[in-house]
Image: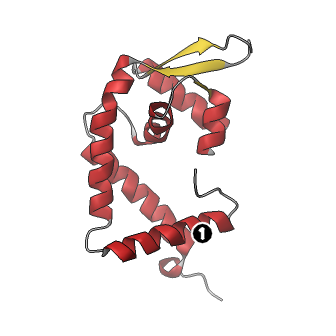
């Protein structure tokens, strides 16, 4: 069987992820965060004071990628890190006032991106596609509820 990228879920999922990230970035242009920072911001808006390890576990990304992302976010004034009171090796990550203030703009950009993504879909088609995506994630061993 020949590999046809146009019929490959893996290839198309990769393209979709890149396109959605670019669309979010375009809609949030000038807001003060990069697309790769959005998942970290989402976790911290849900409750900051998380360790880097907790963020890694929740977002399932590489340690080096997380370290670089957090460094850029700290440099840009979105987060600050404090020593963990009980674990000297760990740091807690907190949003700054600037990081907290991005929430409304970022969420509006994310909502607009979702609307553009699902343009022309009927409600049941959208719900069905999302369910299929969760099933695909589960098939790959990723908890789709996260």
Q: Nearer the viewer, residue 16 or 60?
A: 60
- How far across and how far down the image is residue 105, in percent? 27, 37
Residue occupying image coordinates x 60% and y 35%: 55
- How far across and how far down the image is residue 53, in percent? 67, 31
Question: Residue 55, relative to residue 145: is it above or below?
Answer: above
Q: Is residue 100 left or right of residue 88?
A: left
Mark 1, other Cα within 10 Å: few <14 / some 14–19 / many ≥20: some
Residue occupying image coordinates x 28% and y 60%: 115
Report the colour scheme: secondary structure
Question: Residue 27, relative to residue 2: is it above or below?
Answer: above
Question: Residue 34, relative to residue 134: is it above or below?
Answer: above
Asked which quadrant contains residue 143, the reply is bottom right
- How far across and how far down the image is residue 75, in percent? 44, 19
Query: Farthest bottom residue?
Result: 1
Q: For the residue labelled by badge 1, is the local secondary structure a helix, a strand or a loop?
A: helix
Q: Is residue 16 left or right of residue 116?
A: right
- How far across and how far down the image is residue 138, in percent? 65, 64
Pointer 1 residue = 136
Residue occupying image coordinates x 56% and y 69%: 10
Question: Residue 93, relative to residue 4: is it above or below?
Answer: above
Residue 82 seen in this snapshot? yes
Residue 64 seen in this snapshot? no
Asked which quadrant contains residue 32, the reply is top left
Residue occupying image coordinates x 52% and y 67%: 133
């Amino acid at each position: 069987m020949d590999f046809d990228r146009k019929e490959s879920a893996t290839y198309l999922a990769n393209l979709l992820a890149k396109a959605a990230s670019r669309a979010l970035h375009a809609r949030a242009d000038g807001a003060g965060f990069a697309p790769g920072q959005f998942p970290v911001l989402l976790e911290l808006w849900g409750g900051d004071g998380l360790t880097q390890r907790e963020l890694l576990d929740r977002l399932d990304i590489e340690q080096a990628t997380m370290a670089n992302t957090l460094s850029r976010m700290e440099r840009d004034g979105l987060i600050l890190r404090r020593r963990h009171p009980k674990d000297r090796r760990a740091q807690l990550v907190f949003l700054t006032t600037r990081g907290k203030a991005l929430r409304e703009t970022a969420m509006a950009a994310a909502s607009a991106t979702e609307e553009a993504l699902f343009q022309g879909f009927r409600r049941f088609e959208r719900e069905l596609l999302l369910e299929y995506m969760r099933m695909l994630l589960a098939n790959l061993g990723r908890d789709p509820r996260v």
